[in-house]
Image (spheres, rainbow, N blue to C red):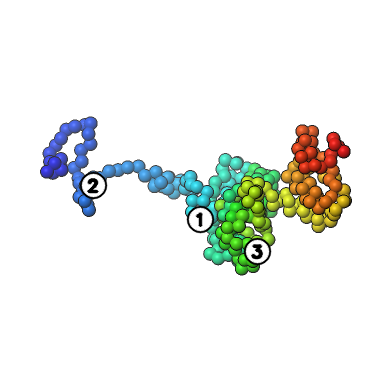
């Protein structure tokens, strides 16, 4: 009865809303209301102004792959994550799929982001994470759940799809942040010392810039190979840092 009275009797009270229309649906009494729906407004605004819809979401919000893209090369604040298009539904036989938890930032990445890289260059794509799936060629080497680091992924993607020879298993004692810094530095140092220099036990090696990423990797690999290591840092304050590796430098030699 009260509802009927509110529908047909004028009640003058400017401080309270007056509802004239009601619907009783499945035990609920409903009244019409207009409320702001921000996602719809954002979509309409972007649609009519020729922009993409932007939203804030968790890095691993769902299984959709995303990557970092710069709307305006050279402007770092124009970077946004965009969906990865045309993703094949199945892995190639030599590929692995990795859920990434950390990415490295190196000089090449920075130059490309600033618009100063060569047109033929792409970001290195160093990452670390856990394997989600493996192709047939690597099933005897890796399995889902393995902690790995690698390179060659799309820029700062949440799901890396790379060839299995570009990844390597990392121990649980190594964090994902530490693991993401391993691939480029250690592969470069290993190739230089083991394949080119063919460094061996009891040989001597001088490493310049030993406090840098590749320098630290070179010192570690040279010591692992049993060589006698001499090192020079790029800055005076790095002497103590180099000394932690047990390498000889001009201050200790």
Foreground tag (2 vs 3):
3
Dot 1: few (<14), some (14–19), or many (≥20) neighbours within 10 Å?
A: few
Q: Is residue 137 above or below residue 188?
A: below
Foreground tag (1 vs 3):
3
> Marks 3 and 2: in contact by CB < 8 Å?
no
Q: Which residue is mark 1?
A: 64
Q: Which mark is residue 141?
A: 3
At a point 85% along the width and 35% down the height, the residue shown is 251
Q: Is residue 19 above or below residue 200?
A: above
Is 150 in front, or is 30? Answer: 150
Q: Which residue is mark 2?
A: 30
At mark 1, the secondary structure is loop
At a point 48% along the width and 54% down the height, the residue shown is 62
At a point 18% along the width and 42% down the height, the residue shown is 20
Q: Position of residue 210 (x, y in %)?
A: 78, 42
Of the numbered discs 2 and 3, the one sitting upstream in the chain is 2
In the picture, which quadrant includes the C terminus? top right
Q: CA distance from mark 2 to mark 3?
A: 60 Å
Dot 3: few (<14), some (14–19), or many (≥20) neighbours within 10 Å?
A: few
> Marks 3 and 1: in contact by CB < 8 Å?
no
In the picture, which quadrant includes the N terminus? top left
Of the numbered discs 1 and 2, the one sitting upstream in the chain is 2
Taking the image as shown, residue 71 lies to the left or right of residue 173, namely: left
At mark 2, the secondary structure is strand
Q: Is residue 137 above or below residue 220?
A: below
Q: CA distance from mark 1 to mark 2?
A: 37 Å
Q: Position of residue 183 (x, y in %)?
A: 69, 52
At a point 81% along the width and 57% down the height, the residue shown is 195
Q: Is residue 47 visible?
A: yes
Dot 2: few (<14), some (14–19), or many (≥20) neighbours within 10 Å?
A: few
Q: Position of residue 32 (x, y in %)?
A: 25, 45
């Amino acid at each position: 009865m009260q509802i009927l009275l509110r529908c047909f009797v004028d009640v003058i009270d400017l401080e309270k809303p007056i509802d004239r229309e009601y619907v009783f649906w499945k035990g609920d009494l409903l009244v019409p209301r207009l409320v702001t729906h921000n996602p719809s407004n954002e979509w309409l605004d972007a649609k009519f102004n020729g922009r993409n819809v932007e939203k804030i979401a968790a890095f691993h919000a769902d299984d959709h792959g995303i990557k970092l893209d710069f709307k305006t090369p050279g402007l770092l604040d124009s970077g946004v994550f965009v969906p990865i298009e045309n993703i094949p539904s199945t892995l190639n036989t030599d590929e692995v799929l990795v859920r990434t938890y950390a990415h490295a930032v190196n000089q090449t990445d920075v130059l490309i982001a600033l618009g100063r890289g060569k047109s033929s260059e792409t970001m290195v794509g160093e990452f670390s994470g856990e394997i989600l799936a493996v192709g047939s060629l690597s099933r005897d080497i890796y399995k889902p759940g393995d902690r790995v680091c690698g390179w060659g992924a799309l820029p700062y993607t949440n799901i890396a799809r790379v060839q299995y020879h570009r990844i390597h298993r990392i121990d649980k004692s190594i964090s994902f942040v530490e693991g993401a810094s391993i691939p480029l530095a250690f592969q470069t140092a290993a190739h230089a010392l083991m394949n080119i220099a063919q460094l061996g036990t009891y040989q001597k090696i001088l490493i310049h810039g030993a406090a840098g990423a590749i320098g630290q990797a070179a010192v570690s690999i040279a010591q692992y190979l049993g060589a006698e290591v001499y090192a020079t840092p790029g800055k005076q304050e790095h002497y103590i840092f180099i000394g932690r590796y047990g390498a000889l430098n001009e201050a200790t030699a």
